[in-house]
């Protein structure tokens, strides 16, 4: 749009990479997101021939799936300047927040696998980096039908512990229970990061963490979830009935380790959410800004009416504040991966998602009746933004948890 972009002190190499990603974002991701959002049946989003697969393929062809995996496993982590990954996530959120989340989540089990010095995990990360077709897709399975915010809030109360339980028998864990239909990419994923209970007497503090293939006997899936916002982001449940998981897939078999490192997970996931939804806030602002110049009422464009100008200026201030804050937090946490600031990450997640929702709502107001029409993308942006205040943890529960990390 026609206003100055500040805070873009990046190298020419990063600028040219961003140009490539911007083309992919606006020519492939944005139109695919709009078309997928309109599909009545969420099963059609994941069907063969769906535009979702063009998005997956484009993401892989650009090598964006390798950006968090170190060179030893075939990736390019730490080979670009830190702002590159941050600005890429923002651009994808600008194009379509639901698809940005889907692409981000698709990498998570493999990014995590690369951190474990276990030959099978290193090979998994290597195979993922080589996959330019989208054959391997990840998800992160935490939420359960009976436990949502319980995961965000943690605690040692056995009543609030995970329902999915794993019991070690010989060289395998036997897993039983269900992960809820909110698991992003749950209906297409080939691999999952799976949170289980290893010691039910310790509630959420008795957790183990596994990285597993989802084609093992005893694992099945529910139908893709039908929901209000982020419809291009497919979601679905995972059901475990005496599923046998090889012992070495339980990459964190010690609950104390998860309790001690939980902050890193919170910082990573909330950091990503903050950037993506700052991107959506900007997209909603840009729609309103453009429309206010085109729509004439009272004999002049809307943007010339002082009340609309004030509204736009307020939206702009909030959107720029959320973006600046998200970028600053993400940069700090990128260079401090072992001691990230959880408080800043959660604050940025809450600020970005609440700003995106507010700015999208104000943008709809500027569109008037047309803001409610499917013909304009702003009603979709509003629905997408609204979901983000619940996604990856309800903002209130996350904020409460973050206060433990001052
Ligand atoms: C778009 C989207 C994507 C998602 N992706 C994933 C994913 O990839 N993987 C995954 O595992 N999950 C995912 N989730 C699930 C998400 O993490 C949960 O929806 C979230 O944690 C809230 O859980 P819940 O929906 O069960 O709500 P609940 O926990 O039932 O909360 C309902 C309400 O009660 C309040 N509440 C809950 N507990 C307390 C308490 N102890 N004290 C006071 N108030 C309380 C909450 O603040 C909220 O307002 C996703 C959700 C969305 C919307």
Image: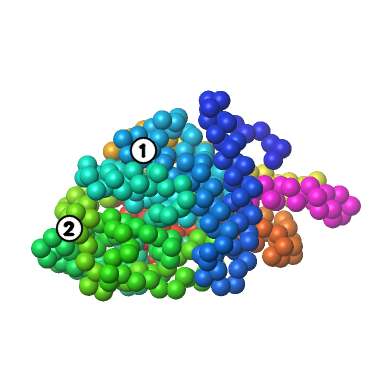
Q: Is residue 9 magenta?
A: no
Magenta span: chief secondary structure:
helix
379 relative position to 48: left or right: right
In the image, what residue occupies the spot 31% across and 56% down? 193
**Image quadrant of residue 123?**
top left
Residue at mark 2: C-beta within 8 A of ligand 1: no
Q: Tell me if mark 2 has few (under 14), some (14-19) or many (20+) residues whose alpha carbon lies within 10 angstroms of its own.
A: some
- Residue 200 in percent (x, y) is at 17, 67
In the image, what residue occupies the spot 56% across and 25% down? 12
**Image quadrant of residue 232?**
bottom right
- Residue 391 in percent (x, y) is at 44, 59
- Residue 153 in percent (x, y) is at 30, 60
Residue lying at the far left of the rendered structure:
170
In the image, what residue occupies the spot 31% across and 69% down? 219
285 relative position to 271: left or right: right
Mark drawn on residue 247: 2
In the image, what residue occupies the spot 80% across and 50% down? 294
Quarter of the render that holds ligand 1: bottom left
Q: Is residue 289 visible?
A: yes
Question: Looking at this view, is 16 or 72 the one in front?
Answer: 72
- Residue 91 in percent (x, y) is at 56, 43
Tag 1 residue: 74
395 relative position to 252: left or right: right
Placement of the N terminus among the 4 image quadrants:
top right
Q: Is residue 284 magenta?
A: yes
Helix, strand or loop at label 1? It is loop
Extent of the magenta region: 280-302
């Amino acid at each position: 749009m026609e206003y100055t972009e500040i805070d873009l002190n990046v190298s020419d190499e990063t600028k040219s990479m961003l140009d490539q990603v911007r083309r992919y974002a606006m020519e492939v991701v944005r139109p695919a997101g709009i078309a997928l959002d309109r599909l009545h049946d969420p099963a059609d989003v994941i069907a063969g021939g769906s535009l979702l697969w063009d998005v997956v393929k484009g993401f892989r062809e650009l090598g964006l799936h390798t950006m968090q995996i170190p060179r030893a496993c075939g990736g390019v982590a730490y080979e670009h300047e830190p702002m590159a990954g941050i600005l890429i996530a923002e651009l994808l959120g600008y194009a379509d927040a639901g698809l940005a989340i889907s692409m981000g989540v698709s990498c998570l089990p493999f990014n995590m696998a690369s951190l474990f010095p276990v030959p099978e995990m290193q090979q998994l990360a290597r195979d993922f980096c080589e996959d330019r077709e989208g054959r391997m897709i990840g998800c992160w399975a935490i939420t359960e039908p009976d436990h949502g915010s319980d995961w965000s809030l943690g605690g040692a109360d056995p009543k609030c512990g995970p329902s999915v339980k794993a019991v070690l028998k010989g060289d395998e864990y036997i897993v039983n229970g269900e992960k809820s239909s909110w698991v992003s990419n749950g209906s297409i994923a080939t691999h999952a990061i799976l949170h289980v209970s290893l010691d039910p007497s310790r509630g959420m503090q008795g957790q183990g963490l596994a990285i597993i293939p989802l084609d093992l006997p005893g694992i099945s899936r529910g139908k893709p979830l039908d929901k209000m916002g982020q419809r291009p982001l497919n979601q679905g449940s995972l059901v475990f009935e005496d599923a046998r998981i090889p012992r070495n897939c339980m990459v964190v078999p010690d609950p104390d380790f998860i309790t001690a490192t939980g902050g890193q997970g919170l910082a990573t996931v909330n950091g990503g959410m903050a950037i993506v939804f700052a991107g959506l806030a900007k997209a909603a602002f840009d729609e309103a800004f453009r429309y206010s110049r085109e729509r004439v009422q009272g004999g002049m464009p809307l943007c010339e009416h002082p009340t609309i100008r004030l509204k736009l200026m307020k939206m702009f201030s909030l959107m720029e504040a959320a973006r600046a804050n998200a970028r600053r937090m993400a940069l700090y946490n990128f260079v401090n991966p072992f001691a990230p600031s959880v408080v800043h990450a959660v604050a940025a997640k809450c600020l970005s998602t609440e700003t995106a929702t507010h700015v999208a709502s104000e943008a709809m107001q500027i569109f008037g009746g047309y803001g409610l029409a499917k013909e304009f993308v702003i009603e979709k942006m509003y629905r997408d933004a609204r979901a983000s205040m619940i996604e990856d943890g309800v903002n209130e529960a996350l904020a409460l948890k973050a206060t433990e990390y001052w």
